[in-house]
Amino acid sequence: MLFKELNLGKCKTYLIACNTHHQAVLVDPVQDNIDRYLAVLAYHGLELIYVIDTHTHADHRSACKVLSELTDAKIVMHRLAPHPLVDVHVDEGDELKVGNIVMQVLHTPGHTPDGIALVLNDRVLTGDTLMIKGTGRTDFAGGNPAEEYDSIIEKLFTLPDETLVFPAHDYRGNTQSTIGEEKSMNPRVAGKDREQFIDIMENLGLPLPDKIQEVLQLNQTELDDDLYELPSIAELNQILQLEPDEVREALSLPTPPVLIDVRSEEEFNGTLGHIESSKLIPLDKLSENIPTLEQYKNENIIVVCRSGVRSTTAAALLTGMGFEKVSNLRGGMLAWNEAVK
């Protein structure tokens, strides 16, 4: 097995390759370093078959989309990931094979709902859930300190003590640790119970990353940088979020709301299905369809996507264009289908 950390700096990207079959995967690639990744792959004569984000990143642009376009590698993320272009959605217990290498997936929410760790041989890639002498922050949207504690204690800390730990970020110049070292020396979890950990995480008072709203929206959607002026966090937070039952009730009214589904046509007709009567307008086509939507400017509009993230961006964009009664289906089609069960 070839295993290399490819980035210098706080954001870590890992190359994992099978020397027998010359197949490779890149984990948490950064858009600024695409040329370097391609050069390393070419130098070693490797075929890139997967690009994996261990979670939706808030501090840098993911390179998964561009690398997939350049190499035909499949994008892999957890099934709760909001990005529309994921080819392989994984969950707890799934396996990914790269030649003779088998990686086991652990679902490790807490930093984000879609966090995963990858276990292979003597090591684990922990994403931003467990860092070297630290843990991922839990104050972003969807973060949950209780879930992060459980992910660390009940999943990662059940691995053998000698398991090598490779996180997605490091801010102190560290490169690796072990599960045993983190159990005994990590200041946020060593000797701490669940309530103590929650108290620590809720009182960190960390500043938000620069341009977090732009980075998150671009990593969660298929939008290009120059297509829209993206909504601010304040504008996103102003969007009314409706639960599936509330949307279902609204649809039963004599004058039901207009449903706008901003997924791709493939998603709209795919396994998650779509809500009857919804109008398909992909997010990247929203601007050019505004003349068509003008007739609904004074009506109630509910926007829908896979997980509720793209649709929140779309709802904020519509609100900024003068549509005054726009709300969002919280959790998207994932939540809608779950509510039917």
Image: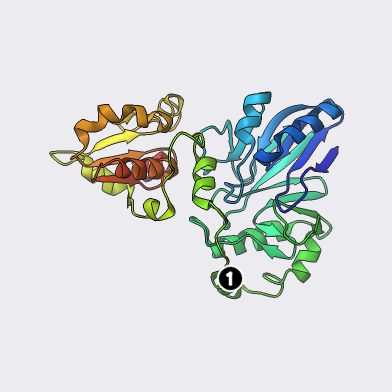
Give the quarter of the image for residue 23: top right
Place of residue 282 in the rendered image (x, y in percent of width and height, measured from the top left): 40, 30
Q: Which residue is at a point 28% across and 36% down the rendered structure image?
A: 259
Q: Residues within 10 Å of mark 1 (few under 14, many from 20)?
A: few
Which of these two is toward me, 27 or 59? Answer: 59
Which of these two is toward me, 67 or 306? Answer: 67
Q: Which residue is at a point 19% across and 38% down the rendered structure image?
A: 256
- Residue placed furthest toward the left: 254
Which of these two is toward me, 227 or 316? Answer: 227
Question: In which quadrant is the C terminus drawn?
Answer: top left
Q: Is residue 171 above or below residue 340?
A: below
SS type, badge 1: loop
Place of residue 250 in the rendered image (x, y in percent of width and height, measured from the top left): 22, 44
What residue is shown with label 1?
A: 204
Which of these two is toward me, 299 or 184? Answer: 299
Place of residue 242 in the rendered image (x, y in percent of width and height, measured from the top left): 31, 50
Q: How many marks?
A: 1
Colour mapping used in the image? rainbow
Confirm whether residue 335 shows in the render. Answer: no
Amino acid on which disc 1 is placed: Leu
Q: Which residue is at a point 82% across and 42% down the rendered structure image?
A: 4
Place of residue 276 in the rendered image (x, y in percent of width and height, measured from the top left): 29, 30
Question: In which quadrant is the N terminus drawn?
Answer: top right
Give the quarter of the image for residue 7: top right
Confirm whether residue 203 shows in the render. Answer: yes
Give the quarter of the image for residue 96: top right
Q: In the image, is 180 to the left or to the right of 75?
A: right
Q: In the image, is 179 to the left or to the right of 339?
A: right
